[in-house]
Amino acid sequence: MDNNVYLKILKLFGSKGPRFTTEDLARELGTSKRTVYAYFSSKDEMIEKAIDFVFTEIIKSDTDILENQELSTHEKIKQYFQNIPDAYSIGTIIRHMEDLQRHYPNLHEKVNHHLNTIWDDVIQLVEEGIQKQELKAVDTVVLKLMLNETLRKLLDYEFIARNQVSFESGIKAMSDIILYGLMNYDQTQR
């Protein structure tokens, strides 16, 4: 399936939530409803495949970094946190989570599962780095909580508007805090 189809579904989902119609999608694609139904059996499937598309793209990009044997643990972690996902796609889904919960509870659960596990691979890498004494020992449960809650807040349109922060700048700030800490190096020596 052409990625353009999923991007059109996300566009419609962003503007209308799950209330978009098959006719809306056909119009966006410049095709007929019949052609749309040749690819998808239902609107549920359209939304689910678009959700899968978004998270598959994020996971693939992260996996490419984490499985690169030429990178050290430090380099993998640094590149992982600098690899910022597309805020529009994921934010579009998050913005309509209440609608998903009300009308498509299985898809709501799927998105929550993705959001709750999105950091698992990097947490595993951190734990391996701690065991090898390449990284400072930290509580990875708390680290994952920080990552999960920060991601959810940065995907909340009202939060970013109220605090005048963009998704990208917020992720970069979070990454800098995690990678480099709060203290200036010379002050930590006291």
Image (spheres, rainbow, N blue to C red):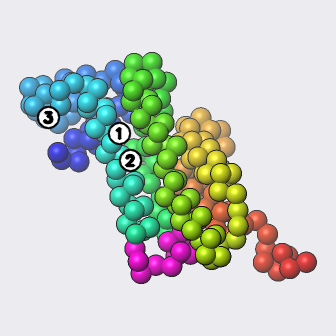
Res. 55 mark: 2
Residue bounds of the magenta highlight: 68-78
The residue depicted at 35 percent of the width and 24 percent of the height is 18
Which residue is the extreme one toward the right?
190
* For marks 1 and 3 on the same chain, the one whose residue lies earlier in the sequence: 3
The residue tagged 1 is 51
Find out whether the residues at labels 2 and 3 contact each other: C-beta distance under 8 Å. Answer: no
Is residue 27 in the magenta section?
no
The residue depicted at 28 percent of the width and 38 percent of the height is 49
- The residues bearing labels 1 and 3 have C-alpha atoms spaced at a distance of 16 Å
The residue tagged 3 is 39
Quadrant housing residue 45:
top left
Mark 3 element type: helix
* For marks 2 and 3 on the same chain, the one whose residue lies earlier in the sequence: 3
Mark 2 element type: helix
The residue depicted at 64 percent of the width and 69 percent of the height is 130
